[in-house]
Image (cartoon, rainbow, N blue to C red):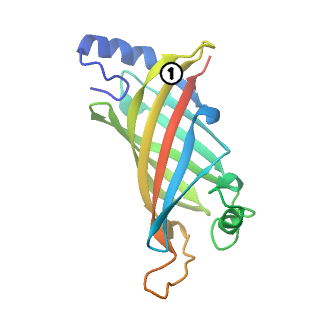
Amino acid sequence: MSIFSRNTEATTAATDLAALTGDYTIDPAHSTIGFVARHAMVTNVKGGFQDFTGTLHLDGADPSRSTASLDVVMDSISTGNADRDGHLKSADFFRTDEFPTMTFRSTEARDLGGGDYRITGDLTILGTTRPLSIDLEFNGAAKDPFGNERVGFEGKAEILRSEWGLTWNAALETGGVLVSDKIKLNFDISAIRNA
C-alpha cells in the first residue's frame, strides 16, 4: 500500500497512484510549518513560520522517485510573542539578517505501507546542512471548488537544534536549562497540482 492511496483494493490503488503522479506546489494559505520547544523544563512553547514556498513531485508508479523541496523565510517566525520572536531572529538564535532562509531538499523517499511515508533530505539552517527524516501520513486527494487538484500530508520530525549551531541557552536555578535542545517539527501540507 502506498502513501498515495488508502484504498485496500490493489487495482483501485494502482489507478489512484497513477492519477496522482505529477508536480505540485505547496499552498501556504492552507499549510502550516510548526515547531514545539520545551521552555524552562515545564511547558511547551509552540511556533511556526508564516512565509514559505515549496514543491512536490509525486511518482505513482515508483514512490521512491518522489521528491520535495521547501524554502522558509526565517523572519516570518511567529510564537505569538513579539519579544520572543525578536530574540529568535537575533544573533542568539537564527541570525535572520545573515541567514534569511531555511531550506529542505529531499534525497530519498520511502513507502512505509499503510499510507505512511518517510522522506529524508538535507535541512540547512545557519549555513549548516544535516540530514533530516520526516514521517508523513497521506491525508487524501481532492478537487476543490475552484478546480484545483489537491493532495494533503501530515508530517512530524525531531531535531537537536545544537546540531545546526543553535546553542544559546540559560541555566535555571532549579537545574536544567531554559530552552530544550530537542525540537519537534510539525507539517500540515496542502499542495496543488501544477497545470
In the image: residue 62, left or right of residue 79: left
Q: Give 41 or 22, whichever is nearer the viewer.
A: 41
Residue in view at x 49 percent, y 43 percent: 187
Position in image of residue 69 (x %, y %) = 55, 40
Position in image of residue 153 (x %, y %) = 45, 34
Q: Which residue is mark 1?
A: 22
Quadrant containing the N terminus is top left
Residue in view at x 26 percent, y 11 percent: 11
Residues packed near mark 1 inside 10 Å, few (<14), some (14 to 19) or many (20 plus): some
Q: Is residue 144 above or below residue 73?
A: above
Kind of residue at badge 1: Gly
Residue in view at x 44 percent, y 70 percent: 42
Seen from this angle, which residue lies furthest bottom?
Answer: 173
Q: Give 192 or 176, whichever is nearer the viewer.
A: 176
Quadrant containing the C terminus is top right
Position in image of residue 162 (x %, y %) = 49, 70
Residue in view at x 30 percent, y 11 percent: 12
Which secondary structure lies at badge 1? strand
**Quadrant in which residue 176 is drawn:** bottom left
Position in image of residue 65 (x %, y %) = 41, 32
In the image: residue 19, left or right of residue 72: left
Q: Is residue 49 above or below residue 191?
A: below
